[in-house]
Image (cartoon, rainbow, N blue to C red):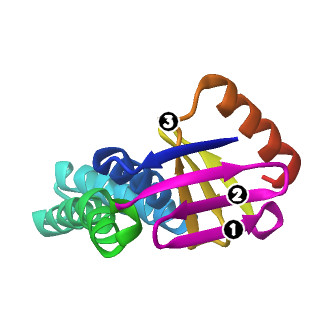
Amino acid sequence: MQFSFSYDKSKTLQALRYHFISKRDIKLMMILVNVFAIVSAILLYFKKVRPEPFLLGSCIWVFMMAAIWYILPHSIYKKTPMFKERFIADINENGLSFENEKGEAYWAWSQFEKFLETPYFFHFYFNNKSFILLPKDEMGDEMRHDLRGILNRSIKK
């Protein structure tokens, strides 16, 4: 299976958000900050604490969400020149390769720890922090179905 693709900025930013939100430590941090904000709001309502803990929890929540939703995805997008180039992807039973005028990169399926499918991308993870995004826009339904079969056989979830 072979097709040409480029990265759409808004869809790529959304995929990067999925990546950050799916991380266990970020999920835990979001839960803890939300619990702190809710508990401090309840205690404030019953006049058990002053308003500062509630304001602190609210500010932390706003800053954390701004970082996860805007700052991190935009900074990664700006730092990665790959997102501004056009590629030809070649997918087969053995692995995945990306090719453009600058060169070619090949990865065997065994190099990937896991994969994740989101609305616009397939995420291929080498480890918890290193991954590749493969856009689904240029693929047909049959190609996506075939790729899912290859991934389920080749990469352990």
| Front in this rendered view, residue 57 or 128 | 128
For badge 1, the amino acid type reads Tyr
Residue 6: give x, y in percent of width and height.
Answer: 41, 50
For badge 2, the amino acid type reads Leu
Q: Is residue 79 left or right of residue 102?
A: left
Residue 25: give x, y in percent of width and height.
Answer: 52, 68
Real-space Cα distance between discs 1 and 2? 6 Å
Q: Residue 96 has which mark? A: 2
Real-space Cα distance between discs 1 and 3? 20 Å
First of labels 2, 3 by sequence position: 2
Residue lying at 24% horizontally and 59% vertically, measured from the top left: 70
Residue with the mark numbered 3? 138
Residue with the mark numbered 1? 106
Real-space Cα distance between discs 2 and 3? 16 Å
Q: Secondary structure at mark 1?
A: strand
Q: How many marks?
A: 3
Residue 30: give x, y in percent of width and height.
Answer: 41, 59
- How many residues crowd around disc 1 within 10 Å: few (fewer than 14), some, or many (20 or more)? some
